Image (cartoon, rainbow, N blue to C red):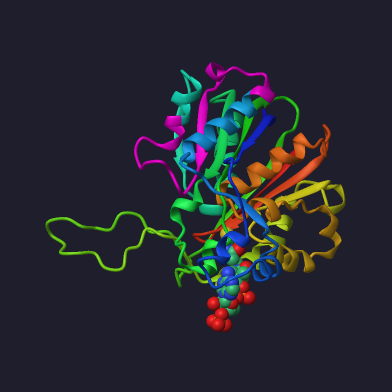
Amino acid sequence: MYSKIIGAGFYVPDNMVKNEFFESFLDTNDEWISSRTGIKSRFFSKGENTSDLGTKAAEMALDESGLKADELDMIVFATMTPDMYMPSTACIVKKNIGAEKAFAFDIGAACSGFMYALTVASQFIENGSVRNALVIGGEVMSKALDFSDRSTAVLFGDGAGAVVLAASQEPGIIKSYLGAKDDSKLSLVLEALPVENPFVEKAEGSTNKLAMEGREVFKFSTQVVGQAIDEVLKDTGYGYEDVKMIIPHQANYRLIDYAIGKNKNLQDKFYLNVDRYGNTSAGSVAIALSEVRQKGLLKPGDLIILLGFGGGFTWGSLLIKI
Ligand code: COA
C-alpha cells in the first residue's frame, strides 16, 4: 500500500510586508536583504494564530481532495510556533474543520517539520493503520521574532500549507529520508518555558525569541541539501534525470543557490518562492507544493523531491510520484 497526495492547500495572512518596512526601525535596507537572501516580501499575521492559518490551508487541501473532514483518520501538524502547548495545534484544527474521528498531534522538527510529519503519516497509511491523513506545516514566525534583531527579523514570514494523503495502490510517496544531528553551538534556537518553580530562584537569559548564528546555519544547510537528494534517490531505481522538480525549504535564495551550485545538473529543477514569502519554516515546503499544483506545473506521474533542513539540526527529503 502506498500513500498518495490527493489534495493540497495553503494560506498566508492578508498582510504583505515589503523589505522597506524594516528600514524605519532597523539599520537595514531593501538592497541588503534582497542581495543576501533573495527575500523581497513576506506576510505577517495581524492576529491570526498558527491554527487559523493551518485550518484555512487544510480546508483548501480537503476541497481539492474531494474528501470530507469526517473521513480523515489522523491529523499531524508540524510547527514550532503552536498556539498553545496544550491542546496541540492539530487538535484545534480537528475541532475547526470537524474531523470527528481523527486522532491528532503536533510534530516539532523546526524547518524540516513538514518532511517529518509527511513521513510519519505515510507510515500509518502504508502499514494499513489508517486510510486518510491530513498533514499540515505552518507557523506564525512573527510571534517568535525579535524585531530589534536585524539578522533574524527580516528573514522569516507567516504561513501554512497542507496536504491530504490517502491509501492507494498507485505509487505516491516512494521513499523518505530523515536526519538529525547535534547543534552543539546552539546556532538556531527558540526557547520554551524556563524552569521556574519554588526550587529555582530565577531562570536567566530566557527570551522566547528566535536566535540564530547565521553563518553556522548556512554551513550546515548547504552541506545537507545535496546529501538529502542523493539519499532519497538511493536504491529506488530513479536518478537525477527522472526528477521533474525539487521543492526545497525556502530558507533564503543565496543559501539554496550556493547549495545548487554544488549540484549543477539539478539547477533547473529547484522551485523557489522565498522572494514572496520569506522563510515560513515548517510551512515553506507545504506552501510551495500547493502553489506548484495550483499553477499546474505538475502532472500525474511526475516525480518530485521535497527537501527540508533547519533547527535541531534536522533535515529530510521525500521522493514522491504525483
Ligand atoms: N541588514 C543589514 N546588515 C545586516 C543585516 C541586515 N538585515 N543582518 C546582518 N547584518 C550585518 C551583520 O550585523 C554584520 O555586520 P558587521 O560586519 O558590522 O558585524 C554583516 O551584516 C555580516 O553579517 P553576517 O552574519 O556575516 O552576514 P552573512 O553574509 O553571513 O549573511 C545571513 C547573513 C543570515 C543572510 C546568512 O548567514 C544566512 O543566509 N544564513 C542562513 C540563515 C537561514 O537561512 N536560517 C534559517 C535556516 S532554516
Quarter of the rendered structure image containing ligand 1: bottom right
Whether residue 322 is visible to the viewer of this picture, yes or no, is no
Q: Nearer the viewer, residue 18 or 64?
A: 18
Whether residue 148 is visible to the viewer of this picture, yes or no, is yes
What is the magenta range? 63-92
Q: In which quarter of the image is residue 300?
A: top right
111 relative position to 95: left or right = right
Q: Where is residue 58 in the image (x, y as percent from the top left)?
A: 58, 30
201 relative position to 1: left or right = left
Report the residue at 76% width, 36% height from top: 293
Q: Nearer the viewer, residue 77 or 295?
A: 295
Q: Nearer the viewer, residue 228 or 188?
A: 188
**Quadrant where the image shows the N terminus:** top right
Q: Is residue 76 magenta?
A: yes
Q: Which residue lies furthest to the left in this view?
A: 198
Report the residue at 41% width, 60% height from top: 209
Q: Position of residue 116 (x, y in %)?
A: 56, 46
Report the residue at 60% width, 41% height from top: 12
